Amino acid sequence: MKFDKKVSELIKINTEPKTELEKNQFQNKAIMMMGNMLTIFKNITAGVIIMIIAGCSSSEFTSHPNPISIIYDTDIGTDVDDAGALAILHILADKGEANILATISANQNPFSAPAIDVINTYYGRPDLPIGSSKTGPDPEQWFHKIIPHYPHNLKSGNDAPEAVALYRMILADQPDNSVTIVAVGWLTNIADLLDSTPDKYSPLNGKELVAAKVKELVSMGGVWPNTENQSDYNFKMDRPAANKVIEKWPGEIMFTGLGEDVMNGSRLAAEVDTSNPVSAFYKNFFKEIKVTERPSWDLIAVLYAVRGLSDYFTAISDGHCVAKQDSNNKWVPGRHKNHSYLVYKMPQTKLAEVIENLLLTPPHKR
Ligand SMILES: [Ca+2]
């Protein structure tokens, strides 16, 4: 099933009033589903018993007791780390550590959403909802010209659901305090979500919906603790959006910002053939800008969003970030409000190995 068909069906389910006939059909379906679930439960129980008897260990691709529900928001195409970050998000989902709810472009470039679709399709999730900003920046830089060579359904971001509508539809359907949003580009969609008004998906406004459903926003932005004239790309690209999110986001934000000195991509480009589009994206990027590896900015944001601090990072939470009108950010030490930023705990070379090993993991074939 095409992802856009799935999204349109989701919209239909969430919006159309149910007639008596539909209600009866719904009840019958619910009864059938309960029967199916009982059968599945019996099969799982039997499977577990067989595994125990046979002495089997669980495979690498087992379900995790608490997979993190993730919405991935990206400016994919302006660099290559967005593609690598989406790849490792899929691998972490294959391992049962993440449940990807949606993949959304903050980049208005019409090729960004198809690039996301290429990666989702390669990693076996062609049905994942994909949204696209209709208002965000559209830089001329574009590094993924080879997307036509890979299977995907979405031909243009103009055909994708509008980003904020998709956010609202997905969030409204999730349990309270359960969703992690990881934003690895500029914060246009996140600011627009805050400004959104009640609609057919939820009677809550954007700020209320976020407060109810989002556990944490992970933002790959800023230089920490202070920029000190090192202008940050993601904040700078949509400064009003960054300032709005810093000042008005109603829940926890983890600013990651790390990655400049954690290099990756060299082994992926050298050892994995171009049937993997992410390997091809890295190869082309390296050729175009004449480098052999790339910082892990966005990949670190995803790694933290799914695995938390783990052995990799420490959080600095005593204080808060102040939005400034230029392209800088300032950390004011003091009592924790709702902001934190990451610092390294694991040596950068070892962290680079963790990330490259995830990039080299082949997709779980479904
Ligand atoms: Ca990015």
Image (tube, rainbow, N blue to C red):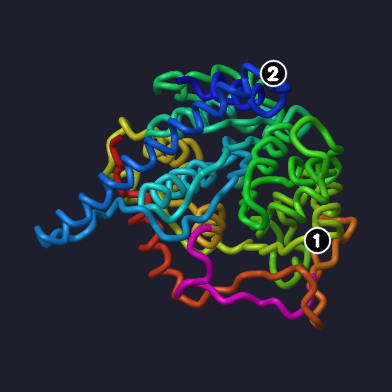
Q: Amino acid at mark 2?
A: Thr
Q: Position of residue 90 (x, y in %)?
A: 43, 45
Q: On the picture, is 357 further left or further right than 89?
A: left
Q: On the picture, is 269 further left or further right than 286?
A: left
Q: Quadrant of the N terminus?
A: top left
Depth order, front residue of 41/163: 41
Q: Amino acid at mark 1?
A: Asn
Which residue corresponds to the image point at 54% horizontal and 25% vertical from the top-left? Answer: 114
Mark 2 and mark 1: Cα distance apart in space: 54 Å
Residue 19, numbered circle:
2
The residues colored magenta run: 306-320
Depth order, front residue of 5/41: 41
In which quarter of the view is residue 55 placed? Answer: bottom left
Q: Mark 1 or mark 2, which is nearer the start of the sequence?
A: 2
**Residue found at the very far left of the displayed protein:** 54
Q: Position of residue 351 (x, y in %)?
A: 42, 67
Res 119 seen here: no
Depth order, front residue of 97/300: 97
Depth order, front residue of 144/18: 18
Q: Which residue is mark 1?
A: 328
Q: Position of residue 168 (x, y in %)?
A: 72, 38
In this rendering, the answer to whether 63 lies above or below 130 is below
